[in-house]
Amino acid sequence: DPATAARVESIVDRTARAEEAAKEAEAGGPPVISPGEVCAALRQGACAPWDALLVLGGGVPPAVDRQLRFVANRCDAALAVRAAQVESGHGAPKILCLSAGTAHAPQLLSPAGLPVWEATVSAAHLLARGAPAGEVLVETTSYDTIGNAFFARTCHADLVGWRRLLVITSAFHMDRSAAIFDWVFKLPHPSYHAVAGSSPSPGSSPGPAKAAYELGYAATPDEGLSGAGVEARAAREAKSAKTVREVRLHTPPRR
């Protein structure tokens, strides 16, 4: 009975996701390390090379040629990881700067009155410090962290074949970011049957495919924010991270 089989599969899927979410919550989320530890692992050959480094957005830049301090830290961490990977004998990873801006504040405008995307300010920071132009990309569609993850995947990773991605953001922002990126990048995609080795047999239903992504998380210091500012942001982030995990747990599986 196809209907019964579908219901059973749905129950099994929800149970598996519940167990995964419980384990993740118990462990405090995915493992997070510092950019320095990533660099050391690359130089020692203890870490496989990254296809791309994802630099998350953080708010409206103070000027068209200057990034927020804590976002600049994220950019500098990406430069350090890139250099370590090149030194280790591997090819340089792409650096993808994320975010058009934020929905919670007015958009930064150029002297000509045109919108200045947050990602382009981050990219300018990287280029000014020696990153090759061909290795720096921007995502200028999203206005929040969920959008960062969604458009990083659908407009970049899915299209060009990146599989090992290092997500770089501030320590206060990491818990929710990791919850969101794990959620978005674990969603299946029909074209990944071959990658995951799960091609259906002739005449059978294909079922859900598995997304073949490996994500790492590197947290940068919360410099540029007051102690009270960090505490307030961290509290909001923790509450939002809990909500994300609850939504993820109850989201129906994609077919």
Image (tube, grey):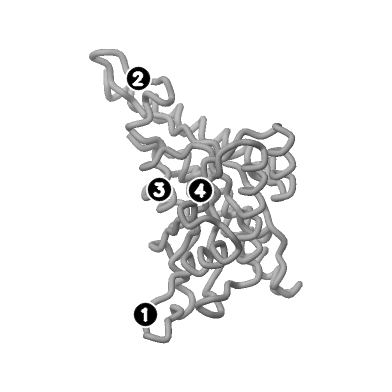
List x then y, in percent, for residue 122: 53, 65
Compare marks 1 and 4 and give the one earlier in the sequence: 4
- Write the residue at 55% across / 39% down: 91
Crowdedness near tag 3: few (<14), some (14–19) or many (≥20) residues, C-alpha within 10 Å: some
Compare marks 3 and 2 and give the one earlier in the sequence: 3
Q: Is residue 81 above or below residue 6?
A: below
Q: Which mark is residue 245?
A: none
Q: Nearer the viewer, residue 107 or 133?
A: 133
Q: Which mark is residue 114?
A: 1
Cα distance between the residues tagged 1 and 4: 27 Å
What is the three-letter code of the residue carrying label 1? Leu
Dot 4 corresponds to which residue?
94
List x then y, in percent, for residue 183: 49, 44
Are discs 3 and 2 less than 8 Å apart at CB? Answer: no
Compare marks 3 and 4 and give the one earlier in the sequence: 4
Cα distance between the residues tagged 2 and 4: 30 Å
Crowdedness near tag 1: few (<14), some (14–19) or many (≥20) residues, C-alpha within 10 Å: few
Cα distance between the residues tagged 3 and 2: 24 Å
Dot 3 corresponds to which residue?
156
Secondary structure of residue under mark 1: loop
Compare marks 2 and 4 and give the one earlier in the sequence: 4
Cα distance between the residues tagged 3 and 4: 11 Å
Dot 2 corresponds to which residue?
199
List x then y, in percent, for residue 78: 61, 54
